[in-house]
Image (cartoon, rainbow, N blue to C red):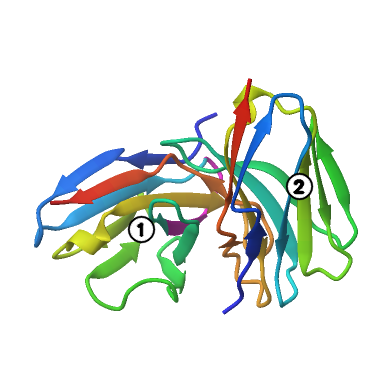
């Protein structure tokens, strides 16, 4: 009964490199959400995807950030040309359906940009 | 956009004491959920509330969905050291988009 799986748990990148964060939702879940958390803060919504579709990307920066959830395989959050301000914990969550379903979270990827 | 205001920001209590924290908003929410986050881990769902006025318990935890749909509280009775962590309220706002909006969190510390 695997939960939401994220990898890697920790990722270190130099400024200007690319970061790829992966998320496999819970079995039977087709809705994926990405959140970002800075130290001592709450979780900020970034993007909501269903298989092959971006439903809501209102929380994602317009530049350097992109997300996908292909028909096969995990969801990917991609950050190009990382900067120090991108250092944060990135959490993925999944739900069984849209609407008011509870979200189940993974243990996050902690990105450090040096 | 819609926002949730969570209070208090932090609490330091003695083991065995009861704890109460709450969340308010200036706009209506369709659901209220309470999560707990331990260091280095993701949030774990504690209680989900779907109807105005709903009161739900999960062990020593009790939460209520305010009748105005603009607030919720979480109570923890007889606290124990493993209750330590950050508690977040969250809710589905208007528009039924599926995304959750989170409060800023309440950090709970329990002294044995």
Residue A28 inside the magenta-drawn segment: yes
Circle 2 or circle 1, nearest the eye:
2
Q: Is residue B34 left or right of residue A108?
A: right
**Inter-mark Cα distance, 2 to 1:** 38 Å
Q: Chain of mark 1?
A: A
Residue that appears at 20% across and 54% down: A19
x%, y% of residue A84? 19, 60
Kind of element beneath mark 1: loop
Residue B97: name its quadrant.
bottom right
Percent across and percent down for residue B65 are 82, 58
Question: On residue A70, which mark appears?
Answer: 1
Residue B82: quadrant of the picture:
top right
Q: Which residues are magenta?
A: A27-35
Front residue of A37 and A57: A37
Q: Quadrant of the C terminus of chain B?
A: top right
Label 2 in the same subunit as label 1: no
SS type, badge 2: strand
Does the magenta segment cover residue B72? no
- Image: A25 above or below B60: below
Q: Which residue is mark 2?
A: B74
Badge 2 sits on which subunit?
Answer: B
Residue closer to the observer: B67 or A53: B67
Q: Is residue A65 above or below residue B32?
A: below
Mark on residue A28?
none
Residue drawn where x is 83% and y is 39% of the image = B57
């Amino acid at each position: 009964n695997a939960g939401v799986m994220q990898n890697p748990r920790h990722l270190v990148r130099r400024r200007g490199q690319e970061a790829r964060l992966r998320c496999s939702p819970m079995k039977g879940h087709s809705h994926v959400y990405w959140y970002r958390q800075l130290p001592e803060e709450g979780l900020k919504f970034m993007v909501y995807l269903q298989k092959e579709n971006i439903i809501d990307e209102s929380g994602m920066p317009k530049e350097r950030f992109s997300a996908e959830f292909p028909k096969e395989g995990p969801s990917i959050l991609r950050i190009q040309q990382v900067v120090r301000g991108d250092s944060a914990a990135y959490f993925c969550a999944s739900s069984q359906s849209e609407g008011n379903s509870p979200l189940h979270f993974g243990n996050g990827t902690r990105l450090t940009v040096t | 956009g819609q926002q949730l205001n969570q209070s208090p920001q932090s609490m330091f209590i003695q083991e065995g004491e009861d704890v109460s924290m709450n969340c308010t908003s200036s706009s209506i929410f369709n659901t209220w959920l309470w999560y707990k986050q331990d260091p280095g881990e993701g949030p774990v769902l504690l209680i989900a509330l779907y109807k105005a006025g709903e009161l739900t318990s999960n062990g020593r935890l009790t939460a209520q969905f305010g009748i105005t749909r603009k607030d919720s509280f979480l109570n923890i009775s007889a606290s124990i050291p493993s209750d330590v962590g950050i508690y977040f309220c969250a809710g589905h706002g208007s528009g039924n988009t599926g995304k959750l909006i989170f409060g800023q969190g309440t950090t709970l510390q329990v002294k044995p």
